[in-house]
Image: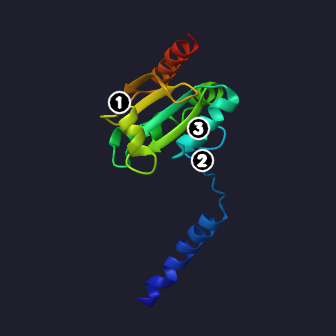
């Protein structure tokens, strides 16, 4: 056993050193500079910021156990083109509909499936919504539709 441990140490030590030395970037949904940047679980903060910046709100209404929600976070929200569009035109907020503000918002917006993606005005009134997974191009198309309705 000691003989094998002697051979494993040179393999394990670099991995341990690397894991402590590599800088980590923490963003809600994606890496720095790419993807949609979300406020996490703070509807009040989203409303405040929307009023301050005079922008609509993009709400990702999700559940932690939801497979399509996880795919959106991994494959769609992290795309640069989605981030460029939504970070420019919206206040983005992601809320777990089963925690904190989630249950009351779920009731207010009649969320009955996950993910539900909602565009709301700066006062928190629904402009439009969609349900289910979509790719970045479809999401941007939805965002453009929501912006047009918001500006009417």
Task: Tell me if I can see residue 31 in this picture.
Answer: yes
Which image quadrant: the C terminus?
top right
Discs 1, 2 touching: Cβ within 8 Å: no
Q: Of label 2 and label 3, which has the lower sequence position?
A: 2
- At a point 54% along the width and 79% down the height, the residue shown is 9
Residue placed under numbered mark 3 in the picture: 46
Residue 60: % across, % down? 46, 36
Residue placed under numbered mark 2 in the picture: 27
- At a point 34% along the width and 32% down the height, the residue shown is 110
Residue 48: % across, % down? 63, 37
* 60 or 109, nearer to the observer: 109
Q: Of label 3 and label 1, which has the lower sequence position?
A: 3
Which image quadrant: the N terminus?
bottom left
Residue placed under numbered mark 1 in the picture: 132
Residue 141 horizontal side relative to residue 55, left or right: left
* 75 or 88, nearer to the observer: 88
Task: Specify the color scheme.
Answer: rainbow
Residue 84: % across, % down? 63, 28
Q: Residue furthest top?
A: 152
Indicate the secondary structure of the residue bearing disc 1: loop
The crowding category of the residue bearing disc 3, from other C-alpha atoms within 10 Å (few below 14, some 14 to 19, many at least 20), is many
């Amino acid at each position: 056993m000691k003989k094998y441990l002697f051979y494993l140490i040179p393999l394990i030590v670099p991995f341990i050193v690397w894991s402590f030395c590599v800088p980590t970037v923490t963003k809600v949904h994606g890496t720095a500079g790419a993807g949609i940047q979300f406020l996490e679980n703070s509807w009040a903060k989203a409303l405040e910021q929307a009023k301050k910046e005079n922008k609509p709100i993009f709400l990702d209404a999700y559940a932690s156990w939801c497979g399509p929600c996880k795919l959106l976070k991994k494959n769609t929200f992290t795309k640069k083109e989605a981030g460029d569009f939504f970070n420019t035109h919206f206040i983005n907020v992601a809320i777990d509909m089963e925690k904190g503000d989630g249950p009351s918002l779920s009731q207010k917006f009649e969320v009955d499936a996950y993910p539900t993606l909602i565009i709301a005005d700066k006062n928190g009134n629904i402009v439009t919504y969609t349900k289910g997974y979509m790719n970045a191009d479809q999401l941007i198309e939805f965002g453009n539709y929501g912006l047009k309705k918001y500006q009417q």
